[in-house]
Structure formats: C-alpha cells, structure tokens
Image (cartoon, grey):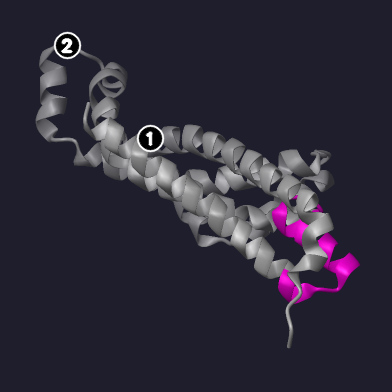
C-alpha cells in the first residue's frame, strides 16, 4: 500500500481550523472544570460530614460514567426538559463537568497534603474556615496541584474529540469531513493524530515551564 499525503494539502487549512477549535474548546472546558472542581474539592474536606458526602457522591458519579454518555445527556436529554443548548455550549459544559470530577479529587489531595500545622496556625490567628482556606491553605495546595491539573488539560485536548459526536467541527470532525471528500482514510487520520500529538506535546512542554517557574518562587 502506498501512502499519498499530498492529497491532503488543499485541506490543511480545514484541519488547522479544527485544531484551533479543539484548543479553544479544551481551554474553555479546563477553566470551567477547574473552577467547579475547586469548589467540589474544597467541599470534600469541610468538617460537616453530610456535605462531604454529597461532594464525594458527585465525584463518584462523574468519574464512574462515560464522558460520551454525559455529553448525550446534556445535548440530547435536556431538550426533553425544555432546555435546549447549542452544541458548542453543551459540549463545553459536558467536558467541564466531567473534568470537575477529576479536578475535585486533585484539589482534595492538594489540600490534604498541606501540613495540619497550617490549619492550627490559622485558627490561632482567628481566621474563619473560609479565610483559612483562601489565604493560607489553597495558595500552598496549588503548588502540588498544578502538575495534575496540567495533565487534566492535556487529557481534555484528547477527549474533546468526542465533541464530533455532537456534530461540532473540531479536529476529529474536520478529519472526517476531509476523509469523506478524499477517501484517504489512512492518510487523513495519521495527519489528525500527528496534529493531536503536536497539541498535547506543546501543551505539556508549556506546562513544564510553568511548573519550573512556579517552583522557583
């Protein structure tokens, strides 16, 4: 079998546009997932057991069900309740919610890694639980959480390929469109895979630089 990648040259702009959309979708999703996951993770360590249980149940359900099912529930299921979301919005919410389950556990682990003496010191200063968390615990926990949250961003770049099931023209869907025109399935998806590899590799490299700068402060 002879591979002919030259057939893809006219469609490179289409693939790059899909890659750019993938980056935007992943970035929006990781911001949403990190914000919500931070809340869920903080709730996981509150002194009130029933509240901790709710957060733990949320994480258990989100991490225990497939992302594709969650996307379908949001995009195809919510209209039956009278809630109609654009495909892009539904996709971002789905990816963000799924990510929040993993970020929540990352946050919990980061908070619990902070020495207990820091909590005791904050109590001696007369700080409330929320102020202790905001000004003392979280700033220290973020250092240990950053690598794992970075890995979650890389994972989201790959998982964003599932947005193609909602007819969103991200990189995978762009690849499918190119394949339908060129009939060059092997060449097309090799190219798509290389683009994903470039995206994840560059993101990992940038995150490593960020971690090094953070650790030197």
Q: Residue furthest right?
A: 181
Answer yes or no: is residue 7 visible. yes
Residue, disc 1? 43
Q: What range of the chain is rendered magenta?
A: 167-187
Tell me what residue is drawn at x 49 percent, y 56 percent.
63
Please tell me whether residue 209 belongs to the stretch shown in magenta.
no
Label 1 secondary element: helix
Q: Position of residue 53 (x, y in %)?
A: 39, 45
**Residue assigned mark 2:** 126
Q: Is residue 103 left or right of residue 170?
A: left
* Contact check, label 2 and label 1, Cβ < 8 Å: no
The secondary structure that most of the magenta stretch takes on is helix
Structural crowding at the residue carrying mark 2, measured as other residues with C-alpha within 10 Å and reported as few (<14), some (14–19) or many (≥20): few
Mark 2 or mark 1: name the one nearer the start of the chain: 1
Instruction: Give the vertical position of 15 relative to 133 (above or below).
Output: below
Secondary element under disc 2, as helix, strand or loop, is loop
Position of residue 16 measured from the top left corner of the image (x, y, whole percent): 72, 48
The answer to whether residue 53 is seen in the rendering is: no
Q: Residue at image x 73%, y 38%?
A: 89
Q: Is residue 131 left or right of residue 32?
A: left
């Amino acid at each position: 079998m002879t591979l002919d990648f030259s057939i893809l040259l006219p469609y490179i702009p289409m693939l790059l546009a899909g890659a750019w959309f993938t980056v935007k979708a992943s970035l929006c999703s990781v911001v949403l997932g990190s914000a919500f996951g931070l809340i869920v993770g903080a709730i996981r360590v509150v002194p009130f057991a029933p509240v901790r249980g709710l957060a733990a149940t949320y994480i258990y359900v989100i991490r225990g069900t497939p992302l594709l099912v969650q996307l379908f529930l949001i995009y195809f299921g919510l209209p039956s309740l009278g809630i109609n979301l654009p495909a892009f919005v539904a996709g971002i919410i789905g990816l963000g919610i799924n990510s929040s389950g993993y970020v929540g556990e990352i946050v919990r682990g980061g908070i619990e890694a902070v020495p207990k003496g820091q909590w005791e010191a904050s109590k001696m200063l007369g700080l409330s639980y929320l102020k202790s968390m905001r000004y003392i615990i979280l700033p220290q926990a973020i250092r240990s959480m950053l690598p794992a949250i970075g890995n979650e961003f890389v994972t989201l770049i790959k998982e964003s390929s599932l947005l193609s099931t909602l007819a969103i023209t991200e990189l995978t869907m762009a690849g499918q469109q190119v394949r339908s025109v060129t009939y060059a399935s092997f060449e097309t998806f090799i190219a798509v895979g290389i683009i994903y590899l470039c995206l994840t590799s560059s993101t990992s490299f940038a995150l490593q630089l960020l971690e090094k700068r953070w650790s030197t402060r």
